Amino acid sequence: MKPPKFEPAEAVLSGETTDIYFARTIDILRHEGLDPAATMEVFSSRYGILCGIEEVKALLARVLPEDKREVWALAEGEAMDRKEVVLRITAPYQSYGLYETAIDGILAHCSGWATAARECVEAAQGVPVVSFGARHVHPSVAGVMEYSAVVGGCTGCASIVGAKLAGIEPSGTIPHALIIIMGDTVKATIAFDKYMPPEAPRTSLVDTFKDEAEESLRVAQALGGKLKSVRLDTPSERGRVTPDLVKEVRARLDLAGFKEVGIFVSGGLDPERIRYFIESGAPVDGFGIGSYISGAKPIDFTADLHEVEGKPIAKRGRIPGITPNPRLKRIM
Amino acid sequence: MKPPKFEPAEAVLSGETTDIYFARTIDILRHEGLDPAATMEVFSSRYGILCGIEEVKALLARVLPEDKREVWALAEGEAMDRKEVVLRITAPYQSYGLYETAIDGILAHCSGWATAARECVEAAQGVPVVSFGARHVHPSVAGVMEYSAVVGGCTGCASIVGAKLAGIEPSGTIPHALIIIMGDTVKATIAFDKYMPPEAPRTSLVDTFKDEAEESLRVAQALGGKLKSVRLDTPSERGRVTPDLVKEVRARLDLAGFKEVGIFVSGGLDPERIRYFIESGAPVDGFGIGSYISGAKPIDFTADLHEVEGKPIAKRGRIPGITPNPRLKRIM
Amino acid sequence: MKPPKFEPAEAVLSGETTDIYFARTIDILRHEGLDPAATMEVFSSRYGILCGIEEVKALLARVLPEDKREVWALAEGEAMDRKEVVLRITAPYQSYGLYETAIDGILAHCSGWATAARECVEAAQGVPVVSFGARHVHPSVAGVMEYSAVVGGCTGCASIVGAKLAGIEPSGTIPHALIIIMGDTVKATIAFDKYMPPEAPRTSLVDTFKDEAEESLRVAQALGGKLKSVRLDTPSERGRVTPDLVKEVRARLDLAGFKEVGIFVSGGLDPERIRYFIESGAPVDGFGIGSYISGAKPIDFTADLHEVEGKPIAKRGRIPGITPNPRLKRIM
Amino acid sequence: MKPPKFEPAEAVLSGETTDIYFARTIDILRHEGLDPAATMEVFSSRYGILCGIEEVKALLARVLPEDKREVWALAEGEAMDRKEVVLRITAPYQSYGLYETAIDGILAHCSGWATAARECVEAAQGVPVVSFGARHVHPSVAGVMEYSAVVGGCTGCASIVGAKLAGIEPSGTIPHALIIIMGDTVKATIAFDKYMPPEAPRTSLVDTFKDEAEESLRVAQALGGKLKSVRLDTPSERGRVTPDLVKEVRARLDLAGFKEVGIFVSGGLDPERIRYFIESGAPVDGFGIGSYISGAKPIDFTADLHEVEGKPIAKRGRIPGITPNPRLKRIM
Amino acid sequence: MKPPKFEPAEAVLSGETTDIYFARTIDILRHEGLDPAATMEVFSSRYGILCGIEEVKALLARVLPEDKREVWALAEGEAMDRKEVVLRITAPYQSYGLYETAIDGILAHCSGWATAARECVEAAQGVPVVSFGARHVHPSVAGVMEYSAVVGGCTGCASIVGAKLAGIEPSGTIPHALIIIMGDTVKATIAFDKYMPPEAPRTSLVDTFKDEAEESLRVAQALGGKLKSVRLDTPSERGRVTPDLVKEVRARLDLAGFKEVGIFVSGGLDPERIRYFIESGAPVDGFGIGSYISGAKPIDFTADLHEVEGKPIAKRGRIPGITPNPRLKRIM
Amino acid sequence: MKPPKFEPAEAVLSGETTDIYFARTIDILRHEGLDPAATMEVFSSRYGILCGIEEVKALLARVLPEDKREVWALAEGEAMDRKEVVLRITAPYQSYGLYETAIDGILAHCSGWATAARECVEAAQGVPVVSFGARHVHPSVAGVMEYSAVVGGCTGCASIVGAKLAGIEPSGTIPHALIIIMGDTVKATIAFDKYMPPEAPRTSLVDTFKDEAEESLRVAQALGGKLKSVRLDTPSERGRVTPDLVKEVRARLDLAGFKEVGIFVSGGLDPERIRYFIESGAPVDGFGIGSYISGAKPIDFTADLHEVEGKPIAKRGRIPGITPNPRLKRIM
């Protein structure tokens, strides 16, 4: 995946999305004629995967004066420790003070999503993981959310905007809605096959009207060799997807000669549940994750001033001066 | 607060923020020439405060055919039960099928924020609660997040964009950064007082360099009658703000004749911690909440088709036909 | 239910089922010429439903000398407290000493089953409960086990021998085996209807090959008005029967006009799970219980001598003399 | 121990102990003229010691047609895994369908007892364990229960019928009743010694009237070299037997010159309590176990059809076809 | 109980038992010529029974200048709340600063003991409680410990010095040592009866060599009407005293005509265990408590200066000025 | 540390501090003319550090007849196991029977303190630990308490009497009281420096009026090179001392050039909290411990007679005869 092109929004650049007191601070400093070179360090409140730093970089590139700036950071997707400094900016304070809210917010939200994705990916031990969770976040962040999931290790995502940002093709099967409107899973699958371009994989959803094992055989027989996989998404009212269900569907497909049809699992998955499938030896070919990734709690980041005009300083509770971190690379 | 003007984003209207399979579904149905009147119901996965329905309404108003639509919903800010239907749309499926992802996402994220805000407000038993958490979310949702917090009961918010959306003035004190740059709390407070318009309340932050009790007296003496309140935001390295600290600062301010100076508390607050302050009888005049509200987990919403061309239908696990809910009002 | 006729087995009367030391004790006492009138009291180790006392009575009637015996007891099916004396025998010791093992054993096992049954019946709050658990006990006690379940409150039982002992008709539906051999649920149900006497209720098992909701509608349509009920016995691999499944099957049957067809639930039920169905408002018409009743832990009973030749005596740890219990009735 | 001779009871052969629906199934199949070769597999719901398979074999030998049967099984006393197939029968279904209840029941109850016995034996680390628990089960199963305990590893059992089935001598000491009737432990022990055959070991029960240490010395002195051991069975009202008590009795017996007199412990023992004695270094020479073995929960067994006329089949939730298990041996 | 005469020890008055820094403080203040009137408040860290205030008063009476002192306090034995001020001293600081360690220490230790005693007394619901615990504390505090126990509600204590301080007669039975040396409980009890003055109650200890029930009857028969009670002190190796043992001894004594002989219980008692006896209905006539009272954790007391020369002052964390407490009485 | 000189108090020698029943026992034995050689063993109820044995030895040296005594013991400060015999006395019983209460009490209290001290010392992993807890115990035991703390491994103690007993110099800084009276920490520290002898280390207490970091710098600057260390004793109302606070104060002192000034931590410390500082890498130079040591629960000791006139004997629950313990050394 190549670095995406992030473009700072107008509302961010104008300071509209900032907390008011930063706007006032800049105002006061201008009145006082104060614009010292100040060093701000940003650190994470817990272990995780850093994400959002590319977008932050795009913002800083727009606002910091080229000749008086020095920026150090970890890279997009790197693991970061609890309390580790991930970003250090030295520049005239007036040039960036207004953006503390936005910088913290981008890193917090994106790193939260990427970290949750990484947990799923690690639990899956090599089985592909796809992000499905746009329906749990506001559409304004659907794209960055799924971009972050891909940074965390997901091999695919369902939203068009997320896939675009991540530079990949969006992943999708068939929703329950299509099957309900067409009245039958086999009919809907055949229509999909008829109208969709050949490169869209034929994956049928097999829990809408009939037992999953029965429906899997029906769609496999209807599509013959063209069926790529079936998706199990059994609702909790029917006991969710279980490792035993996956094994049985596998056995029945094999018995009927459909050994090449894969099984894709979704519905209420999280790392613990994924591990349960893996440890039970269930032959899963892909996991679809919803709210565990998209509803992940943001990771709190804190920005502190540590030097003003080269002099170590800090508020109570913090150590004055530059915090050494040899992992940081100069990026600007 | 009067209803805000929400304007659907272009990326939402174009379907770019949707999951790809809905785009494909619409495509298939067009090829098949199928566009039945379909009834979709949206229900919540848990108890909470409904928020985002105004924004969803703005979207639906743009896409549903005026003569063939019927929309029922609960109102912005109403409490909703677990599994309660909060929105029911009947219209030709092709007109709205593409927006299921966006509709669910708006409601999920906004209701998550509003519900968390409500929990804080209830814990505070009448003491004002202000949302401070823009730094924990991506700037693209900073506005709707704080709007949702206000829907949930917050009396104020810190971001400019959130306050605008909610139709109120943004709230803000003085950040640590200003004090560090100016080198002294009293100096920074005096500068604030000098340059800020009279209607901005003078609230000083008193934990940057000195003990809170000592600093409170210093700023009170420096500003005389003009000081509205002090904000306590003690870092965890200094034991966070405690009810005993609030009581002591109150006692020392009173002893020095500053009975009218309020005390505003922030730093790692959640409903349990707020209750602890309230139950300890700490004389708090306002609470500032960060990530408990802004980092709240979205509330999952599910959208299901229940009728197609007037015929009850449903996928396995759901009850076919309209789900009765007398609390719904027709909104379109 | 009228009292059953219990007939002591030869192996019991001969002392073969006793612990060897009681046989030796009788032998020694005969050598010593000792046969004092002795009072033995039997008490329960915990709260429960007394069962087995009718069978014990049949044994005592065979062995105690008619002119020198006095027996007091609680009645079959009565609740008994922890440590409450439920049986008191006064008679020449040689006439009954050999049967202490058998008396304790009958009461222990039967009271264990009856007590477990009562717990299920109380949890079911009026919904009929049927014992199904003969497959978890040795066939030599299948009959007394289900007799005890009926004493505990079950309205029916599945084994022929148990029903006979309890004076009722055995209850039964259709096993998976019949459906598997006939290859289809509807076919098996029609065969059942064709050959079974009209008084055997038509209850079909609907989870063998297809989704329960779908299969329920198929058998209801096939049998028309003759179908009494469907039995849900979903295996754990398919998530067991849930309250939501019951509600949905109910709704789909109703929608199709089969309001009079009942729903019978089985599979891994215990009082907690029964309560969960009841509290969820699931419209269940009957519960079938297996190992919770038949595999119930026996309730320990202890037999102690408290008087010998009218003189109070007891081993260490027990109170010498008759233990007063006004609830006891003289039965012999 | 050589394999016992099991003889199927008439009530089992006649189908009286079966669940009614199996009787009906056979009836229906006869009407339909269906008697396919069917393969039934029986598997255990949890890890344990298989027991009862000899009795099942005796039953199958009576009912399966010699020329059309094939039976595979694990051996009596073998460890079995959770979900492991322990018995596989291929034969015309009508010949054995009636006995599913009995087969499951024999295995369930006997394996439950044998498994509990094995846990005690393993905890005892070589110290002999004797089953004492006939008083907690119905006399109809007293024999098979203690037979199963011996299969699980007990070196002895107390009931006459159990010992006979297991091909060993029954074990027994002196009950409290004899001592109470004779009025003194020493007197009862002397009478036992006088009348019992020399091969019955002289073990006295020493907690009836006096402190165990004092009474142990009294009986040791009264019987001189003939005393084999003392049994401690202290009631809970006196604090049960403790490791310290065993050590003290040992020390006092040794001090008085009775080093060869053993100490046998009973009363509320289970594996945890046995381990406590062993780990405390208490010099115990034998453990007597009651309800932990005899009141053990049966182990659920499930019987499923997996082939009909050579064709793989299975109900939902199970894998069609023969389940491979190389540990099975053909027994018929 | 009338107030005891406490006499400050020389080592306390000389300041030898104080923490060195208070001695240095007085030294420095003398050099500086500073001896302001200072108000010190002492508060408790938790709820409890105040004890030691009489001894503190005796100390203050010796050191405070009569004309410049004002002392307020709660009374000996009063309940005090968490953080409640129990003592307030206003006097020239040099006169009492040296004694802060001793004042805190006396209150801490004595209140700890009195509070533990009160918990036992409340658990005993009117049954007399006697302190027995001198063996768990250094003999230098054996007296004040048992005095404090009496302040807390004990009706007696075992040590001679404690009884003297509390103005009561010491309580005592017979130790195991006397019985072991005389070789028999009955012999030791008769010797006690022979030589001890008639007012010393005849209470025999009945667990040394024989079972408690047997021994109780032996001593009752030996002493006839003169036996006041038996003491049960069963060691843990014999299962400690249990409610059942008390009930049985009571029953056996009653049966033998000794209804007037009381039962005194000791051995590892604490409030929970006492409650267990009371709630079980065990007919106990007295409880003897050892380390629960004497080993009670001291209650931390804190002494703070709140006024100097009439001016409110306090260290960080405390409220400057006099803390209002209407329950305080002026005592000096 | 050389062995201290302990002098038995008159109240101990006279038997006044004993439990009355020992006094009566001696009285009875005198009347009976019984004074057998008796062996008493004292054992501990749990693992710990033996302390008090020197004081017991001083007592025994005064009361045992020189020609008829044999005393074996572990040494002061040795670790002892649960139930290990730590002291064995053989002598005429009348010579020492009266002192059982005192012997047990001395060992119990002193070993409790020494054991708690050892736990702190082990947790501190080489960082010096000082006992500060005289304020939590009665002044009569302040000395032995701190002596025991030193036996347990503390390098210093605060009370004058304790230091004297332990043969060391008392440790002390500056109390809050001095600072409050002088009105400022710097002023108080300068006064301390002015009047105290040069060998008293200059350690200032820095949490009275100002933030600890700020005050540390103020006193360091005021005293220049003479400041030995600062003591952090932050009250719970300000969040107690935390590892982060220590690190920050260290960093700020270093930054200002005061690398040689140590940091001493106190306030609510126990082994768990000490370990937390050590494991967090906080640069602590000394810990001051209060109630964890001084309020430690005494360790119960039990004294039993095991031989009378050379004959093994013991009460129920104990093993008659000498208990072998090769670790005991003959001390008399």
Image (cartoon, coloured by chain):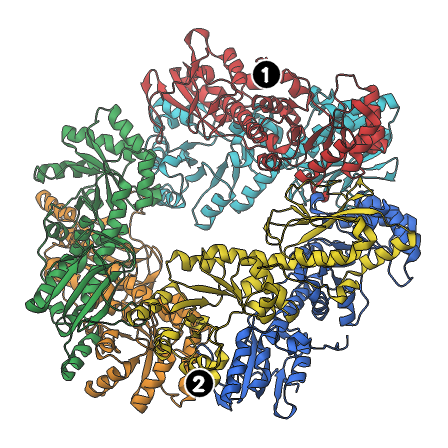
Chain colours: A green, B orange, C cyan, D red, E blue, F yellow
Quarter holding residue F112: bottom right
On the same chain, marks 1 and 2? The answer is no
Residue A286 placed where, x, y %?
23, 39
Quarter holding residue C318: top right
Identify residue type, mark 1.
Glu
Total marks placed: 2
Q: Nearer the viewer, residue B216 or A254?
A: B216
Q: Is residue F209 left or right of residue F327?
A: left
Q: Secondary structure at mark 2?
A: loop
Q: Is residue F277 left or right of residue E209?
A: left
Q: Chain of mark 2?
A: F
Q: Nearer the viewer, residue D92 or F128?
A: F128
Q: Secondary structure at mark 1?
A: helix
Q: Chain of mark 1?
A: D
Quadrant placement of the N terminus of chain E: bottom right
Residue C76 placed where, x, y %?
68, 37
Picture layout, residue B189 above or below residue C275: below
Picture layout, residue D180 above or below residue A4: above
List the residue tagged with mark 1: D10
Name the front one of labels 1 and 2.
Answer: 2
